[in-house]
Image (cartoon, coloured by chain):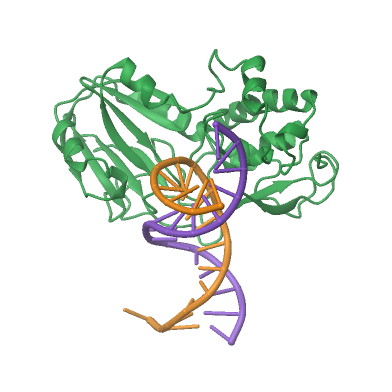
Chain colours: A green, B purple, C orange
DNA sequence: AACCTTCCCTGATGGC
DNA sequence: TGCCATCAGGGAAGGT
């Protein structure tokens, strides 16, 4: 489930390896991931050089010679660099007990929807089992890019992430705070895992209605969001099942999670068993003692 | 406009 | 190579 920290980890990995590289050829199998225009990608990517790697919310923006290549990983998207000198494993394998994928590098398989061969022999692979990811090309124009992402909310690590702006976007909203966090038009980049973690840090019940929250609670949430995201980045992202960084490695932030995926375990603050409920059709974890409903 | 529900997609899991 | 229901969830689309 790549959220901001996972996408940021991938971005940093690609930024270290790929700038200056040029795409020689592309193989892609048409599918939903490229629904706008698979032809455009397969025709325009060859010959393009990697110039920079940016991120907006959960979107990765690969800056090429003439295009912005925009990639959203959905639920199970993996964007990895395959090195010619490193031996392949035959395919992804799942750990029998944990379900974690433990293969670092693999040849394209039937879930690999895009395969870009670079001039130096390396490859950039996009693999996505559930095909919830999205990719598209935008002409390399900053105004086009800005309007493309105009619907997205505050960038948690950006200069625009300020208390007054955050508070303003909460005013008048009546839905559950967790549902609001999952929408990308208030704060961009927070998904199911980090929403639960941020609400735990801020000691807010996920079902609390936004307009019922005290200002000091909103302020705690405002501060908790970048905090849990920063921790996620520091530990290389959260690997529960499918997430891998650009080198094919798992993250370790799953060991740092306070509530997500830990129903019935004791709350790290007070020892009360963590509860799991459903909010906005998403599994939601919280401490019934520390996070009282408002 | 705000809010809510449904749907897409596949592999893992568990009951029988 | 047993079969089937259920679950996981980001975001688009459609309904109220």
Q: Quadrant of the C terminus of chain A?
A: top right
Residue A207 x/y as whole percent:
72, 44
Residue A19 x/y as whole percent:
29, 21
Determine whether A226 is above or below A41 in the image.
above
Determine whether A158 is above or below A265 in the image.
above
Where residue A124 sits, quadrant-wise, is top left
As rendered, which of B12 and A216 lies closer to the eye?
Answer: A216
Total numbered circles:
0
Residue name at image x 86 percent, y 41 percent: A270
As rendered, which of A45 and A141 lies closer to the eye?
Answer: A141
**Residue lying furthest top in this view?**
A159
Q: Note whether residue A173 is visible.
A: yes
Q: Is residue C6 left or right of residue A88?
A: right
Q: Note whether residue A86 is visible.
A: no
Residue name at image x 18 percent, y 44 percent: A27
As rendered, which of A55 and A104 lies closer to the eye?
Answer: A55
Q: Is residue A161 left or right of residue A150?
A: right
Residue A277 x/y as whole percent:
70, 54
Determine whether A200 is above or below A280 in the image.
above
Where residue A90 sits, quadrant-wise, is bottom left
Q: Is residue A271 left or right of residue A284?
A: right
Residue B11 x/y as whole percent:
42, 62
Residue name at image x 35 percent, y 35 percent: A71
């Amino acid at each position: 489930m790549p959220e901001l920290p996972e996408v940021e980890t991938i971005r940093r990995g690609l930024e270290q390896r790929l700038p200056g590289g040029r795409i020689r050829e592309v193989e892609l199998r048409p599918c939903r991931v490229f629904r706008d225009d698979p032809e455009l990608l397969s025709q325009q990517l060859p010959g393009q050089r990697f110039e920079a790697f940016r991120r907006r919310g959960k979107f990765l923006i690969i800056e090429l010679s003439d295009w912005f290549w925009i990639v959203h990983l959905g639920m199970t998207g993996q964007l990895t660099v395959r090195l010619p000198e490193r031996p392949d494993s035959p395919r992804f394998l799942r750990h029998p007990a944990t379900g974690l994928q433990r293969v670092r590098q693999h040849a394209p398989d039937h879930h690999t929807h895009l395969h870009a061969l670079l001039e130096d022999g390396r490859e950039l692979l996009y693999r996505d089992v559930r095909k919830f990811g999205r990719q598209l090309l935008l002409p390399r124009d900053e105004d086009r890019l800005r309007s493309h992402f105009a619907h997205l909310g505050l960038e948690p690590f950006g200069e625009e992430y300020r208390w007054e702006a955050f508070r303003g976007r909460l005013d008048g909203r009546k839905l559950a705070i967790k549902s609001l966090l999952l929408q990308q038009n208030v704060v961009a980049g927070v998904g199911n895992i980090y929403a639960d973690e941020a609400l735990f840090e801020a000691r807010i019940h996920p079902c609390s209605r936004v307009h019922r929250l005290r200002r000091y609670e909103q302020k705690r949430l405002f501060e908790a969001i970048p905090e849990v995201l920063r921790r996620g980045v520091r530990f290389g992202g959260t690997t529960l099942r499918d997430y891998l960084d650009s080198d094919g490695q798992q993250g370790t932030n799953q060991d740092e999670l306070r509530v997500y995926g830990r129903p019935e375990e004791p709350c790290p603050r007070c020892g009360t068993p963590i509860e799991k409920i459903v909010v906005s059709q998403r599994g939601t974890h919280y401490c019934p003692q520390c996070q009282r409903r408002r």
